[in-house]
């Protein structure tokens, strides 16, 4: 019988519960238990099927057989050709035995802000981005590439480039191409104001691009440009045409305000022909520049309900998909009141730092913009130009205090209520 082995394109991270596996061939991340991790270790070198099965007790054989079949059908295990015996998957934290219950061994995903500069000056920008932002202290392309190498060595699997608009950063495509070569799965967030065919051509050549994410706040210029500035609608639609022409996967999000709450269904209909991977909505958040906005701009509960109802109809009618995990699983089962509660709750909770960090244009790590106003000076946890992400992740006092708050769990993992923050160092 043929010998089998793990597909060398996998990346495998040992964790307290077992392991996390990134399959670069389909850009999927899956979680496995300890038994599966042990199997991946045995199968990291070619082994005959019978020799592999001899590791298991009689009563477990049927389960292990179907586990192996599943891994084979998903391409994670393959018949060994004998030609690639010296190619192995990347294993991380393989030798470690001490793991924390509150968080992963290292961040699984990071959001990188290569610059805060942006062509737009949206009234609600959380990041205070604008065309004139001072970029003199932002890291250079070379510094970012050094950081990417250390993130790879520390087992980070997924990167979202955001900002500001990453496309405005000089040399951004050199950073992107380095991230691609290092084997991260990549998302690029952009308002598409600068997006052009030359960008699309470069994006279409990336091996590991998951998607481009953009924002569309209305189904016509009057609504879409209201908070995002003149010309936004036109630029996004032109960008969507280019994305579709180059077969670049993308998703769009609408920030729901009192101005567009009743336009959600039309936005979904407008997006449909461009075949987005997904369409999401989020409520206007009281953060960054949005703090200065007129209170009437924020959607009322009735308006949130109306937006939610339209959104769930869009998904249930198959017009667009949701890529929001909470909805992917639950949308058909949740009624509008429950969905409205979900959105209202988002303003009161914060995801516990168990799997992700954000990195600002100077290389400083922080948890989220939501905590920016709450933690003030303690917002920044350490700088990647002189510290590794693993040391920040595991040793920073503020992070560990946040993890010790009492948490609940939803589809995104653990979260805590922001009013619990009183006890955290600040
Ligand atoms: S496009 Fe995004 S980053 Fe730029 S100003 Fe608007 S909200 Fe901020």
Image (cartoon, rainbow, N blue to C red):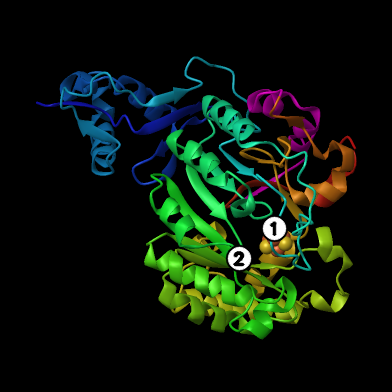
Circle nearer the N terminus (2, 1): 1
Answer above or below: position of 57 versus 256.
Answer: above
- Tell me which segment is drawn in magenta: 386-410
In this image, 83 relative to 40: left or right? left
Neighbour tally class for label 2: few under 14, some 14-19, many 20 plus, Cα within 10 Å: many
In the orientation shown, which residue stands out farthest toward the top? Answer: 95
- Residue 403 in the magenta stretch? The answer is yes
Neighbour tally class for label 1: few under 14, some 14-19, many 20 plus, Cα within 10 Å: many
Residue under numbered circle 1 = 118
Choose top left, top right, bottom left or bottom right for residue 106. top right
Instruction: Name the secondary structure under disc 1.
Output: loop
Q: How many marks?
A: 2
Mark 2 lies within 8 Å of ligand 1 (Cβ measured): yes
Mark 1 lies within 8 Å of ligand 1 (Cβ measured): yes
Question: Quadrant of the image for the C terminus?
Answer: top right
Q: Mark 2 and 1 residues: CB-CB less than 8 Å, in contact? A: yes
> Picture coordinates of residue 236 (x, y %)?
56, 71
- Residue 146 in the magenta stretch? The answer is no
Distance of label 2 from label 1 (alpha carbons): 9 Å
Choose top left, top right, bottom left or bottom right for residue 405. top right
In this image, 46 relative to 216: left or right? left
Answer above or below: position of 367 versus 58.
Answer: below
Q: Residue at point 28% right, 43% down? A: 74
Q: Residue at point 42% right, 38% down? A: 22
Residue under numbered circle 2 = 193
In this image, 395 relative to 18: left or right? right
């Amino acid at each position: 019988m043929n010998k089998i082995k793990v597909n060398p394109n996998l990346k495998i991270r040992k964790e307290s519960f077992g392991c996390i596996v990134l399959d670069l061939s389909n850009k999927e991340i899956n979680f496995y238990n300890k038994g599966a991790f042990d199997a991946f270790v045995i199968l990291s070198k070619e082994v005959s099927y019978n020799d592999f099965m001899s590791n298991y007790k009689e009563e477990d054989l049927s389960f292990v057989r179907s586990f192996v079949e599943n891994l084979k059908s998903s391409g994670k295990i393959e018949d060994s050709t004998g030609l690639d015996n010296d190619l192995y998957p990347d294993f991380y934290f393989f030798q470690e035995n001490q793991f924390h219950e509150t968080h992963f061994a290292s961040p699984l995903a990071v959001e990188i802000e290569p610059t805060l500069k942006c062509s737009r000056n949206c009234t609600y920008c959380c990041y205070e981005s604008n065309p004139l932002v001072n970029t003199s202290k932002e890291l250079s392309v070379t510094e970012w590439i050094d950081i990417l190498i250390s993130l790879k060595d520390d087992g980070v699997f997924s990167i979202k480039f955001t900002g500001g608009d990453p496309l405005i950063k000089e040399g951004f495509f050199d950073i992107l191409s380095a991230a691609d070569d290092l084997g991260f799965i990549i998302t690029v967030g952009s308002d598409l104001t600068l997006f052009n065919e030359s960008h699309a051509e470069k994006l279409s050549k990336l091996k590991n691009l998951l998607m481009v994410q953009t924002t569309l706040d209305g189904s016509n210029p009057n609504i879409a440009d209201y908070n995002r500035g003149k010309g936004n609608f036109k630029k996004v639609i032109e960008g969507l045409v280019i994305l579709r022409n180059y077969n670049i996967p993308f998703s769009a999000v609408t920030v729901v305000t009192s101005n567009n709450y009743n336009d959600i269904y039309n936005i979904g209909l407008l997006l449909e022909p461009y075949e987005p991977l997904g369409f999401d909505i989020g409520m206007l958040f009281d953060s960054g520049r949005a703090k200065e906005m007129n209170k009437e701009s924020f959607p009322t509960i009735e308006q949130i309900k109306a937006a939610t109802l339209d959104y769930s109809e869009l998904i249930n009618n198959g017009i667009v998909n949701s890529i929001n995990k909470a909805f992917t699983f639950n949308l058909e089962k949740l009624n509008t009141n429950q969905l409205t509660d979900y959105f209202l709750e988002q303003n009161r909770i914060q995801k516990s730092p168990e799997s992700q960090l954000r990195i600002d244009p100077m290389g400083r790590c922080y948890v989220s913009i939501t905590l920016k106003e709450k933690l003030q000076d303690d917002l920044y946890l350490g700088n990647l130009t002189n510290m590794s992400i693993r040391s920040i992740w595991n040793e920073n006092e503020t992070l560990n205090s946040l993890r010790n708050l009492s948490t609940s769990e939803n589809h995104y993992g653990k979260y805590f209520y922001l009013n619990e923050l009183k006890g955290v160092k600040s």
